[in-house]
């Protein structure tokens, strides 16, 4: 299905926070930047639903209808955090054909993807990411090293921590994060939540897996988690092979989240993401 959504329907510089230093949280609990959120939302409308962008269209089109975002008859304000999410993150790669880091903004506007270069036009599938998470009250699920990059800003008593795993093709990586409620209605709707999480590959010489008696240390689909590992990290640069931080909002109803990811080791790299509940 092709839906008309133009590049002029979003500000690509806002979508990628182009040439913007990460000096404060993306999401303000008191006053949500709805225009920025809508720019990110429209970016994904364009790239998921339009075949003329050589990015995510073919991958999304192959998903069964039951695995795509569903129309909701009503929106509940107080909902539990969903345990399964499916979605995409926009990265610089041959597979996704995204070019978000040129030297000037004019180049960014005119050369967003390989579709502008008449190259890589035969799309390779970009598999969606699958997140499987569950609540876990340990405050060290967001350790001080993570908090330096994406800080917690709400009251501790209202924060929900979680852990889980992210699946991409045949690879599995740990996930740790938290949510914070945005109490005031935004755009006339209550029920928004800030969500932050990290997906990472740990250096297992520094953060080894800890196998308990009778357990394999691998993912168990019945309990929804987890890799048991030495934790918390001491230094991002030495404890991880890579680590990506995600900060965004869960829309009212708890079924869709959008925001931006950042390389937590090399914070000059960032981009948009989208996930929706997957059952």
Image: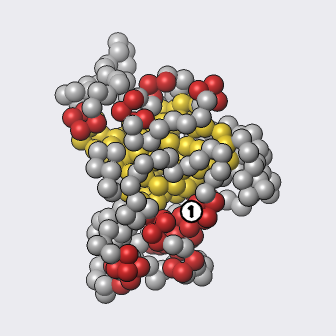
* Disc 1 packing (10 Å; few <14; some 14–19; many ≥20): some
Q: Height in image: 238 above or below 48?
A: above
Q: Residue at x 56, y 49 (%)?
A: 27
Residue 69 in the image, given as x and y percentages of width and height: 62, 59
Residue 133 coordinates in the image, percent (x, y): 51, 37
* Any part of residue 77 in sight: yes
* Nearer to us in this view, 94 or 32: 32
Secondary structure found at label 1? helix
- Residues 124 and 142: in front is 142
Task: Kindly identify the residue that appears in the image at 28 percent across and 73 percent down.
Answer: 103
Farthest-out residue, top:
213
User: Relative to 96, does residue 51 appear above or below in the rendering?
Assistant: below
Q: Quadrant of residue 149?
A: top left
Drawn side of residue 77 relative to residue 245, left or right: right
- Residue 50 image position (x, y, % from top left): 52, 78
* Quarter of the image where one finds residue 33: bottom right
Is residue 230 rendered to the left or right of residue 26? Answer: left
Q: Quadrant of residue 237?
A: top left
Q: Label 1 belongs to which residue?
A: 36
Q: Nearer the viewer, residue 142 or 199?
A: 142
Give x and y (percent) for residue 47.
Answer: 49, 72
Can residue 172 be seen here? The reply is no
Q: Residue at x 30, y 72 (%)?
A: 102
Image quadrant holding the N terminus, namely: bottom right
Residue at the image point whose x is 35% and y is 12% from the top:
213
């Amino acid at each position: 299905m092709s839906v008309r959504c133009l590049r002029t329907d979003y500000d690509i510089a806002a979508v990628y926070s182009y040439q913007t230093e990460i000096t404060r949280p993306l999401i303000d609990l008191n006053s949500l930047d709805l225009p920025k959120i809508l720019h990110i939302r429209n970016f994904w409308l364009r790239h998921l639903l339009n075949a003329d962008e050589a990015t995510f269209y073919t991958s999304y089109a192959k998903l069964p209808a039951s695995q795509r975002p569903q129309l909701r008859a009503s929106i509940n304000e107080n909902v539990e955090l969903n345990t399964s999410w499916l979605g995409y993150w926009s990265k610089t790669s041959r597979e996704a054909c995204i070019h978000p880091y040129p030297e000037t903004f004019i180049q960014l506007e005119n050369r967003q993807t390989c579709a502008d270069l008449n190259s890589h036009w035969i799309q390779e599938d970009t598999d969606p990411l699958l997140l499987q998470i569950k609540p876990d009250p340990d405050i060290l699920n967001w350790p001080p090293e993570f908090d330096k990059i994406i800080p917690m800003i709400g009251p501790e008593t209202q924060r929900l921590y979680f852990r889980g795993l992210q699946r991409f093709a045949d690879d599995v990586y740990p996930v740790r994060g938290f949510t914070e409620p945005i109490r005031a209605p935004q755009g006339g709707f209550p029920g928004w939540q800030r969500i932050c999480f990290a997906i990472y590959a740990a250096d297992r010489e520094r953060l080894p897996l800890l196998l308990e008696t009778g357990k394999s240390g691998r993912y168990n689909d019945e309990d929804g988690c987890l890799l048991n590992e030495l934790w918390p990290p001491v230094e991002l640069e030495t404890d991880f092979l890579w680590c990506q931080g995600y900060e965004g909002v869960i829309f009212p109803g708890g079924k869709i989240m959008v925001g931006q990811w950042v390389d937590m080791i090399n914070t000059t790299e960032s981009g948009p993401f989208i996930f929706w509940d997957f059952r």
